[in-house]
Amino acid sequence: ILINDSGSEITDINALQGSLAAVEEVCNSKVSSDSALHADCERKCDTRSCCFEPNPTYSCYHMEQDWCDEYKPCEYVGFHFFILSSEGGGENDSPAESPQQNIESSETAVTISPQNNEGGDYANVIGTDVASVCSRESLQTLYGIEQCYNKCQAHLCCFPTQNSISNQSCSDQYEQECGAYQQCEKLIYLDHNWNPPTIPYDLTNAVEKACTLPQDRIPVTPEWVANCHTVCASRLCCLADPSTQSSCVYTVGEMECNSYSTCKNLIGGDLRESDSIDDICNSRVSSDNNLHSACEDRCKLRSCCFEDAPFSCYHMEQQWCDDYVACEFIGLSF
């Protein structure tokens, strides 16, 4: 049995190769022109995702700086360290040194002070994080789409995509919250619209053709990501939890949403939230690093529940958030 950096068993040959390779071998200047290498680098960097979290609640950079610094080359795929300042300088602090200092970056790391955890700089950091994970560049990758969806899923009701679901818009009721998550519209409002078939059977086949993952562990291409995203964008609301306002399953109908079920490959597939939260987040996390890491990853799927206003979705989706009360075992609270 082979184990990766996060403590999970490796069964995928691509994951195996990425795990064995040094980070410098998969994360370098070649990623900009090699989509397979770019994907390998993203997978490699995701094994230490807590190093790159801008939210101090999730970040492990200040706890494990040496361990995190080993993954500096992740800058090549847009991952940055967000350093906690002890001076309270906030905006004037500098991000960790980048291996790409001679390369212009469209995303600038934001630093924060631990003395500013309510509103102010903290809100700016969270807002910048939404803008970063939902940027046009991020949405060109499978990883980026999943991260953007994780951030935005409770706020999809802010951006109804068609007149047929405009009656479920929550933008008037939650004007401030919808404004805070304005960048999420990039996830569902695309430059190129798709005209879906009107016959259910043809619709299901079209979605499956666009979004079925490549066989034989072939890495997905940017073209695959763009095509599947185009097909699914207006019905990502079908993937939202049916208990939330952002779900459109009761508006467009279960049959239509079922036709878009293959779109789930954009956000983690069948394994997404497949295990009970209580099996992952419990009292054992304090003595089991692997379980602690798994709990952190799971809680990120509903991160807006633990944010400060106006980025919190707790008052919008209290029942949905309360399902994740077990995240308190890693210090997260509503």
Image (spheres, grey):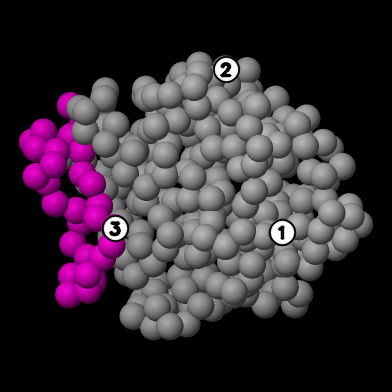
- Rendered view: 151 above or below 242: below
Location of mark 2 (residue): 318
* Residue 24 screen position, x and y as percent: 36, 76
Decide if residue 129 is on the left or right side of residue 232: left
Q: The residue tagged with tag 3: helix, strand or loop?
A: loop
Indicate which label's residue lies in the foreground, 1 or 2.
Answer: 1
Does the magenta portion include 322? Answer: no
Location of mark 1 (residue): 195
- Rendered view: 77 above or below 87: below
Q: Amino acid at mark 3?
A: Glu
Q: Residue 41, which numbered label? A: none
Q: Are marks 3 and 1 in contact (CB under 8 Å)?
A: no
Q: Residue at x 43, y 59 (%)?
A: 136
Q: Residue at x 43, y 83 (%)?
A: 33
Location of mark 3 (residue): 107
Decide if residue 148 is on the left or right side of residue 10: left
Q: Residue at x 41, y 78 (%)?
A: 31
Q: Amino acid at mark 2?
A: Gln
Q: Is residue 304 visible?
A: yes
Q: Please state the total of marks drawn on the protein image.
A: 3
Q: The residue tagged with tag 2: helix, strand or loop?
A: helix
Magenta range is 86-115
